[in-house]
Amino acid sequence: MSLTKKIAHNTIIQIVGKVISTILGLFALALITRYLGLEGFGEYTTVTTFLTFFAVIADLGLTVVTMQMISGHHSQEEENKIINNLFGVRLISTLILFSLAPITVIFFPYSPTVKLGVIIAIGTFIFPSLSQVIIGLFQKKLSMGRNTIAEVLGRITLILGIIIAKYSNSGLNGILIVSVVSSAINFIVHYILALKFATIKLAYNWSLWKKILSKSWPITITIIFNLIYLRADILLLSIFRGNDEIGLYGAAYKIIDVLTTLPFMFGGLILPIITTAWLDKNYNYFQKVLQKSFDFMMIIAIPLVIGAQFLGRPLISLIAGKDFGEAGVILQILIFAVAAIFIGTMFSYAVIAMDKQKRMIKFYAFTSITALAGYLILIPRFSYFGAAAITVYSEALIAVCAAVCLYKYNRWLPSMQTSLKVFASSIIMGIFLYFLPKTMQETGILLLLSISGASIIYFSSLYLLGGIKKEDLTAIFSRSPKNKTATYGSGQAPGPGTGL
């Protein structure tokens, strides 16, 4: 099978798996919000957001560095050596950072319930942190179906655990405990499924560790800045506002977290490909893959923005419960940040592929400083609306800065030919939703039918306008040899319809 088709099929497997995992994740969210209520979910959101700061810093940029270092041409022995040393660095950084969490939380004005929750939930973040190195290996091998299996089993464990916690009336602590168990199951399955490609074990090679850290520190700096402008909103809300408001914002943000897994998942698939293309000086292929990736992101992002303006509130009510209906307005604002993340992710990953991530530090620093100032000014006055507005500003600015950096070192800007067709198709879909009777949003089944109808209208319009071509769809699903011509060696790139 050609590289193009292998990537395309791997992408399809990931998307199908992600759909299943997302449905399970949303079901778990629905159980948690309905069980804990606004205030309890606000406490839950505070706990998970606080620990997210430690998890993201502990990452040290190794998720990206893993894909970067094992891309290209390595012997199996050399690849195993890199993976095992990356795993060693990840374990040490994770243990060091998370040992600080119980100490740090003492100095925050949180309730005893939240402080105890932070201690309980540490494992929820340690296990996924260790899994990231293995996921990087799966991405290199184009075997992300294995990641899907681990993720789905982890989600099923979580749902069963939440049901048990609810009927045993174990409250917030019970939910946090089952989250730890779910994360542990996820890691164990990842580890077992990785044995086909490598024996994952701790390794210490100081020269290789220095190489890893030299590549990771610029990404670590940008991650810290990214963390400030991306997560400081909930942290500051937890200080300045009440649990009810945190619960509303957290519910909307959970939807955002679900949506933004797609661009990072897709970017993880593309990064090894464009890194290899850049190292081999195959700049034509590098740009073609970026263009197809950009088109795919636009195809998904723009209709999400339009659709959320009409269906945001009923969608939140369906998922989290009617008590969280007001979070739909927050979602209508935050969805613009999602669009910026979809678009900016490909630019940022291209910068990493070119090994120019150090050049982005100043942009992240500026964004973080201005965003933090914005949060401090707007959150006390406008609560979650101020937080959402600054989040949109931050993500949009980073996307623009990454595009500028990419253009500076590669002289590439995306063609907007497909994007214009996406805009037109999204407007047609929006007109359909505008005239759709409100009664179509009153129950879950009717809302799902409305979303399905809007999706059919959007993709049909996009197909008729030429944004998706028949030959591109055929290239993915046909196993005929005549469709296996687009290979890396030929310098060809996938068609728009492949999502690459």
Image (spheres, helix red, strand yellow):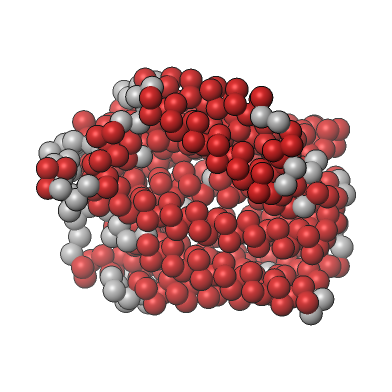
- Determine the residue located farthest toward the bottom in the rendered image: 168
- Residue 409: quarter of image: top left
Q: Which residue is at a point 77% across and 52% down the rendered structure image?
A: 321
Q: Is residue 84 visible?
A: yes
195 versus 22 height, above or below? below
Q: Name the residue at 74% across, 37% down.
A: 439
**Tag count:** 0
Position of 293 compared to 331: left or right? left
Q: Nearer the viewer, residue 181 or 10?
A: 10
**Is 123 in front, or is 279?**
123
Residue 41: % across, % down: 78, 58
Residue 20 x %, y %: 50, 58
- Which of the 4 image quadrants contains residue 490? top left
Q: Can you see residue 232?
A: no
Q: Nearer the viewer, residue 160 or 462?
A: 462
Name the quarter where the C terminus is drawn: top left
For the residue pair 24 and 450, the one nearer the viewer reads as: 450
Left or right: residue 457 versus residue 172 is left
Residue at x-position 48% and y-position 55%:
18
Is 373 positioned to the left or the right of 139 in the image? right
Query: x, y percentage for residue 246?
Result: 79, 49
Q: Position of residue 172 (x, y in %)?
A: 78, 68
x 70%, y 58%: residue = 30
Please, is residue 379 above or below residue 220 in the view? above
